Image: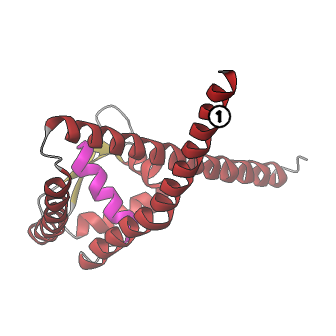
Amino acid sequence: MLDVVTDDHTERKAAVEAATEELTALVVDHLVPVVHRFRIATARRLELGLPELLCLDLLRHLGPLPSGTIGERVGLTRSTVSKMLRRLEDGGHVRREASAGHRQGVEVWLVPHEERDRIVASFRTAVRDLVRATVTTYGLYRPDRRARAAGQLLHLVHALHLVASSEADRAWWRAAIVRRRRARRAKGLP
């Protein structure tokens, strides 16, 4: 009896590892590059850079944000964020206001922009049509199936966010260490 349980456990573990490898390859090698290409195409159509598009997406999803938060989320320095926001403001995409709670802070607001909103809506419509086909094909209109699929997608998105955030944090700390070393050398310290 113990051998049967051990064999079942070993087979399950091997099946879990195989499925994990297959799905990881699907996400990393296929899904992420396609999503990135989609975002680049959207940015190009709007005549924006990818960081600018990410900034606009953040504002669309989260509402007004301090410029520092935008920099942290997009992974840019304060001066780069300031220049980017100036370009976006000049293009009629955002409005900047002095933050009431922070002396040097700037609150950034997304403003309506006819061309941008039309282009984003057309991309979303194209994706919505593809999702509708998937919903129909796999019966995701049934609440139980949709809830399960949505839960799995949310779990995947959360995992990808954790990996990306961890890498961004490592990059920030590496840069901070380099800045600290330079500052120490400039002062003549070891």
In the depicted view, which residue is nearer to us: 101 or 145?
145
Q: Left of 183 or right of it: where is 152?
A: left
Q: Secondary structure at mark 1?
A: helix
Splitting the image into 4 quarters, where does residue 134 fall? Answer: bottom left
Q: Is residue 106 visible?
A: no
Q: Position of residue 107 (x, y in %)?
A: 29, 44
Name above or below for residue 97 compared with residue 57: above
In the image: residue 75, left or right of residue 127: right
Q: Which residues are magenta?
A: 49-63
**What residue sits 88% from the left and 46% below the top?**
189
Kindly identify the residue that appears in the image at 15 percent across and 56 percent down.
111
Q: Is residue 186 visible?
A: yes
Kindly give the residue lying farthest to the front in the view shown.
1
Judging by the rendered image, the residue that carries numbered circle 1 is 7
Pick the quarter of the image with the N terminus. top right
Indicate the position of residue 16 as horizontal and vertical percent values.
55, 43
Mark 1 closeness class: few <14, some 14–19, many ≥20 residues within 10 Å: few
Residue in front for this viewpoint, 178 or 130:
130
Q: Is residue 80 above or below residue 101?
A: below
Scheme of image coloration: secondary structure
What amino acid is labelled 1 in the image?
A: Asp
Q: Is residue 57 magenta?
A: yes
Q: Which is more toward the observer, 145 or 187?
A: 145
| Dominant SS in magenta | helix
